[in-house]
Image (cartoon, helix red, strand yellow):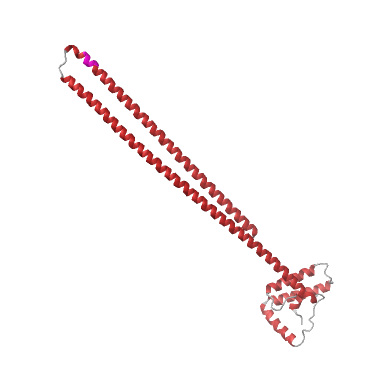
């Protein structure tokens, strides 16, 4: 009876995966032109190996075969199973083959473990970078809000001062006008000589000119204050727009770097697969 385990050089408890690896290794050895066998011997060995592979990889066939092999060995028929020239070296060959496969698989697992560690470290670095950028953006926003609050407070304070100044100026102008009116009324109530009418008219005209000049100066001062307020508001709007552009540029740069880093990580992970 043919011992398929001995033909493949594997133990009785070998798994189907090990049977497949041993079968492929033996078939590759047979395909080597330097292997010392004739064509007929090669065909016979291929037949034996294929039969062993089919029998040991199908569970139903393997169970039946194991029962027959146990009965045959128990009957004393297992002293020297049949096979080709190289049956005596099957165990050594299988041991070497299994060792090579184990080393290769171990190296592959170590390499994959290293790549996973690298990917994990890169993800942690990206996470730390993202947290740092988020904190920086939050800090910039807080600084902008503080600056805006200070500017708003300063603008409100300036507006209140301008309002107080306007009220005081209007009150002073009203007081001057009222004093001038009272003076005119008192002067009008006094009996005036006929020949002093022209002097009164002249003084009235001079007083009116002074009032007009004061009103013109007040109007000019109000226009100057309005222009100053306009320039301050314009400067504030330009500063706020500059800060907004700066924050948007930082956010866009952060998103671009994050997308680039994630694409590089995906590319490295895809290349490892």
Residue 188 at x, y percent in the picture: 17, 19
Q: Find residue 185 and report its image quarter.
A: top left
Q: Residue at x 79, y 75 (%)?
A: 89
Q: Find residue 74 and report its image quarter.
A: bottom right
Residue 267 at x, y percent in the picture: 62, 55
Asked whether 9 or 151 is in front, the reply is: 151
Q: Is residue 160 above or below residue 196?
A: below
In the picture, the quarter occupied by the C terminus is: bottom right
Q: Residue at x 77, y 75 (%)?
A: 90
Q: Is residue 82 above or below residue 240?
A: below
Q: Is residue 226 above or below residue 142?
A: above
Asked if residue 199 is among those painted magenta in the image, a careful observer would answer yes
Asked if residue 272 is among those painted magenta in the image, a careful observer would answer no
In the picture, the quarter occupied by the N terminus is: bottom right
Q: Is residue 243 above or below residue 50?
A: above
Residue 259 at x, y percent in the picture: 56, 51
Asked whether 182 or 28 is in front, the reply is: 182
* Horizontal relation, residue 16 to residue 190: left or right: right
Residue 246 at x, y percent in the picture: 50, 43
**Residue lying farthest to the bottom in this orientation:** 75
**Residue lying farthest to the left in this orientation:** 191
For the record, the magenta segment spans 198-202
- The prevailing secondary structure element of the residues shown in magenta is helix
Q: Residue at x 72, y 86 (%)?
A: 71
């Amino acid at each position: 009876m043919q011992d398929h385990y001995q033909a493949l050089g594997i133990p009785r408890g070998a798994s189907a995966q090990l049977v497949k690896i041993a079968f492929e290794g033996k078939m590759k050895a047979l395909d080597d032109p330097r292997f010392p066998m004739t064509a007929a011997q090669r065909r016979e060995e291929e037949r034996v190996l294929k039969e062993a592979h089919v029998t040991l990889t199908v569970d139903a066939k393997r169970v039946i075969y194991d029962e027959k092999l146990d009965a045959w060995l128990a009957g004393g028929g297992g002293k020297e199973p049949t096979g080709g020239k190289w049956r005596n070296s099957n165990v050594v060959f299988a041991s070497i083959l299994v060792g090579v496969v184990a080393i290769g698989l171990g190296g592959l697992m170590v390499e994959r473990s290293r790549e996973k560690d690298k990917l994990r470290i890169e993800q942690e670095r990206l996470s730390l970078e993202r947290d740092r950028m988020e904190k920086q953006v939050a800090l910039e926003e807080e600084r902008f809000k503080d600056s805006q609050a200070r500017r708003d407070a300063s603008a409100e304070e300036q507006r209140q001062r301008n309002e107080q100044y306007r009220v005081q100026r209007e009150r002073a102008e009203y007081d001057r006008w009222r004093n001038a009116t009272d003076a005119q009324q008192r002067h009008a109530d006094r009996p005036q000589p006929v020949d002093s009418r022209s002097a009164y008219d002249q003084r009235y005209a001079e007083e009116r000119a002074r009032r007009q000049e004061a009103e013109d100066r007040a109007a000019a001062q109000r226009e100057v204050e309005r222009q100053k307020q306009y320039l301050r508001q314009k400067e504030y709007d330009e500063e706020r727009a500059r800060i907004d552009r700066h924050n948007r540029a930082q956010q866009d740069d952060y998103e671009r770097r994050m997308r680039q880093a994630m694409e590089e990580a995906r590319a490295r992970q895809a290349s490892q697969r």
